[in-house]
Image (cartoon, rainbow, N blue to C red):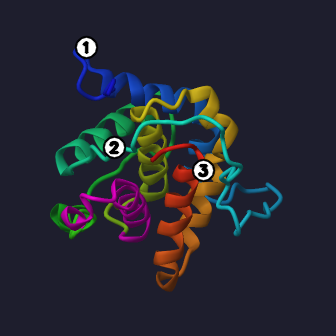
């Protein structure tokens, strides 16, 4: 597979910049939460801002290629990108000396035979475990898009299928009892996108 994160020339940095460039407004709103004076938005609690329509494209088997070191690098790159673009909410320091971030990977090794579920679990935990002092919605949302990019979905197609502000806001407000539902939603979305 053509792996974005293994190419020379710091492709991970370019991938994070691609996500920011295409979703800058969404990430800005996720960073601010409810914007003063903005009419409260009605979010799609059923679909999480995802387009579940089935594609006729047949893609390769979905690959899960995230680990603790890579997530730390993504956090650092996103933090730097937000700061360089004058975002007021850019600091994303780890809570509990990184232990909460490590906990996002707990047990994922048992999902080696189901990479879609492993990915869905990580994205959910990056939001709900609150591993960062600030930026949990943004990092989980960026990782979600990076996972699609890494699995060769073009950014133009991702933008058609993913409302990132809606995705981040809905994920952040799910109850703990909805963890299984969230993972199934993300896994089903990937299946409908044509991933095996």
Above or below, 158 against 130 in this view is above
The answer to if 112 sits in the magenta stretch is yes
Q: Kindly identify which numbered label has been placed on residue 9.
A: 1
Q: What residue is drawn where x is 69% and y is 37%?
A: 160
Chief SS of the magenta region: helix
Spatial separation of the CA atoms under disc 1 and disc 2? 22 Å
Sequence-wise, the earlier of marks 3 and 2 is: 2
The spot of residue 58 in percent (x, y) is 54, 36
Badge 3: residue crowd in 10 Å (few <14, some 14–19, many ≥20):
some
Q: Mark 2 points at which residue?
A: 63
Image point (38%, 64%), residue name = 121
Q: Which portion, as a residue range, is magenta?
A: 108-129
How much space separates mark 3 and mark 1, taking CA atoms? 32 Å
In-front residue for pair 60/190: 60
Secondary structure at badge 2 equals loop
Tell me which label, 3 or 1, sits earlier in the chain.
1
Lateral position of residue 181 relative to residue 75, left or right? right
Do the residues bearing badges 3 and 1 touch, measured as CB atoms within 8 Å?
no
Tell which residue pokes out farthest to the bottom in this image.
Answer: 177
For residue 184, above or below residue 191: below
Q: Where is residue 127 in the image (x, y as percent from the top left)?
A: 43, 63
Q: Name the residue under label 3.
A: 192
């Amino acid at each position: 597979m053509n792996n974005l994160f293994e190419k020379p020339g710091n492709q991970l940095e370019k991938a994070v910049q691609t996500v920011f460039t295409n979703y800058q407004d969404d990430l800005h709103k996720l960073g601010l939460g409810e914007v003063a004076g903005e009419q409260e938005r009605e979010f799609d609690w059923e679909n999480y801002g995802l387009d579940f329509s089935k594609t006729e494209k047949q893609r390769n088997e979905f690959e899960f290629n995230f680990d603790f070191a890579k997530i730390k690098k993504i956090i650092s790159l996103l933090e730097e990108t937000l700061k360089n673009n004058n975002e007021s909410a850019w600091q994303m320091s780890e809570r509990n000396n990184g232990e909460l971030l490590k906990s996002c990977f707990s047990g994922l090794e048992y999902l080696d035979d189901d990479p879609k579920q492993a990915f869905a679990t990580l994205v959910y935990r990056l939001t709900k475990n609150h591993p960062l002092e600030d930026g949990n919605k943004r990092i989980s949302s960026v990782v979600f898009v990076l996972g699609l990019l890494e699995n060769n979905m073009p950014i133009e197609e991702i933008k058609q299928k993913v409302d990132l502000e809606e995705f981040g806001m809905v994920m952040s407000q799910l109850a703990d009892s909805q963890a299984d539902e969230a993972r199934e939603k993300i896994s089903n979305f990937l299946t409908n996108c044509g991933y095996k």
